[in-house]
Image (cartoon, helix red, strand yellow):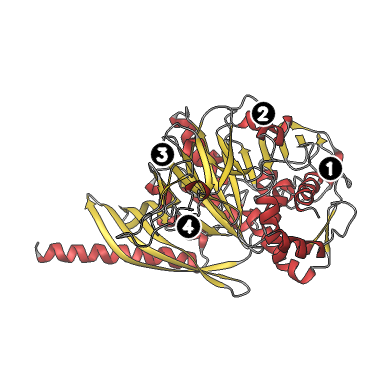
Amino acid sequence: MTVTDIDNGLMLRLRIEALNADYIHCIDDDRLEEWPDSFTEDGVYRVTTRENADLNLPVSLIYCQGRGMFHDRISALRTANIFEPHTYCHSVSALQILESTGGVHRTKSNFLVTRTMSEGAMMTFACGRYLDTIVEQDGALKFRERSVILESRRIDTLLVIPI
Amino acid sequence: MDTLQTNNAPEFVWPHDDTSRVPYRVYTDETLYALEQERIFRGPVWNYLCLECEIPNNGDYKTTYASDTPIIVVRDENGDINAMVNRCAHKGSLVCYKPRGNISELSCVYHNWVYNLRGDLLSVAFKRGVGGKGGLTDEFDNRQHGLEKLRVERFRGMVFGTFSDKTEPVSEYLGEELVASIDRVLIKPVKVLGYHSQIFPNNWKLYVENNKDSYHASLLHVFHNTFGVVRPTMGGGIKISDSGWHHLSYTQRTDIADDQIGKEKVRSRQDQYRLQDTRMMEHRLELGDNVTNSIQTVFPTLVVQQILNCLATRQLIPQGPNQSELIWTILGFEDDDEDMLALRVQANNLVGPAGFISMEDGAVGGWVQRTAKANGREMTVMPMGGRTIEPSEGSRVTEAAVRGFWKGWRDCMGI
């Protein structure tokens, strides 16, 4: 491995970490209308459970495919669905770059989400793994696919804000 | 146990002459919750346990709960399905502590008491002691120390269990109309497409009421109303079993002419609201009719669901007076082709904890629970459609099925 290889590897790692940071701050800052911009036009976002993943079961809790469905998730949350106001605080850690060829990077990282209700009650709402396929697009990195694998099958009350 | 019940029960008297009023106390009271365990979940009801397809092979087991009681469901070496309490007859440890698996016998890891797949005690470790000392005395009879067994019945691919000898066969328990309606949904062999669950910060009965309450569907849920899954103007109705305990609510794509509808200002109908991608609202008419929504509730805690092409069982597990867990088992048919599977994956965005339609049902129960504690002497008011438990053809603007549920609750509880 040459010095250039190491530099390139570090640079990629930093860029992916920046993508993850942009992603979680967009959600935690309630700039959800920008959330779809982290994905490619034909991107896929799904939230499933470790149980479903282990049993190879196809149905998720959330499945968005293509930009339209991302927008629909957010517009529904803003205008259609009823829920008690709450916010998330995400932490992302332990990024692993599993494979990186031809501008396509397969990565894995862990996340932890605390949820705070408007009256103040705070809890660990979710933790698990992001399994991502990230691609280069116009000099930026975008998620072509983000699979959110929740550790627990149990969701407290409901899941409306993306993880 | 009987003494405890008779000491505690009479203190509570139903405060109204019918079930169009319900006292808030029933949602928070520890004593009533304990009584529900004995008189409902271990009483003359069929508890939904699992699907046959979840334990397809001999030796397959799955664990579940009938409210507080942990249960093992297992397919024995003859292919019969048995259910027993997941509690060793010795010291009460869980016998199966993994959610699913395949076994040839049930053995408790604590002291290695071993049972066959019907729950009969086969052997006890160190039965004769060691070196002639310790062990069991001669009076110990294995036959007296099996796992507590449930009576099991399979019905349309579902497995039900009851603790009571008095519970009638499932088809009689449900009644003709519920049987026909479940037959309509579970038209051929199913397979599991996914699981998830929701923890509700509320008493189990609030979620059951929500399912029986066909009045709220087009009012609370924007998706139902705006996209024509359930609108007050669509055809359909509700049916209630003769016992009042079970119900079905269905909607079909035929419009009823009613001038009143346009005049009512309903938040949930937002004609300007549009989806950019409507794939999840696609509906393949796979059940031979144009019914968009058919919800079957089976007393006490099961829902068999068809919403467009979203098929599921929903099993509610009461976990104390202030919490319940709803387990969704998402279904497809065994013979689904790839397109159908893709459609179901999309359509299931509508249901479950993150479902565009169903997430609101998770929220409202908790809101009632928060007011209930301070309102123990007050009562809810359910006047829609009168005071009786009559079915309603052509309209779902009725609370009759909720009143029917409370009749079932009072029948079981003796209150």
Q: Mark 1 points at which residue?
A: B389
Nearer the camera: disc 4 or disc 1:
4
Say if labels 4 and 1 share a chain.
yes
In contact (CB < 8 Å): disc 2 and disc 3: no
In the picture of the structure, the residue carrying the numbered disc 2 is B290
In this rendering, the label closer to the viewer, 1 or 2: 1
Whether labels 3 and 4 share one chain: yes
Q: Name the residue under label 3.
A: B59
Q: Of the residues under marks 3 and 4, which one precedes in the sequence?
A: 3
Tally the numbered discs: 4
The amino acid marked with disc number 3 is: Gly
Q: Can you tell which of label 3 and label 1 is closer to the viewer?
A: 3
Give the position of the C terminus of chain B as an image quadrant: bottom right
Do circles 2 and 3 both sit on a common chain?
A: yes
Q: Residues within 10 Å of mark 4 (few under 14, many from 20)?
A: some
Q: Residue at x 73, y 62 (%)?
A: B3
**Quadrant including the N terminus of chain B:** bottom right
- For the residue labelled by badge 2, is the local secondary structure a helix, a strand or a loop? loop
The chain ID associated with circle 1 is B
Pointer 4 and pointer 2 on the same chain: yes
Q: Nearer the viewer, residue B123 or B396?
A: B123
Mark 3 vs mark 1, CA separation in Å: 44 Å
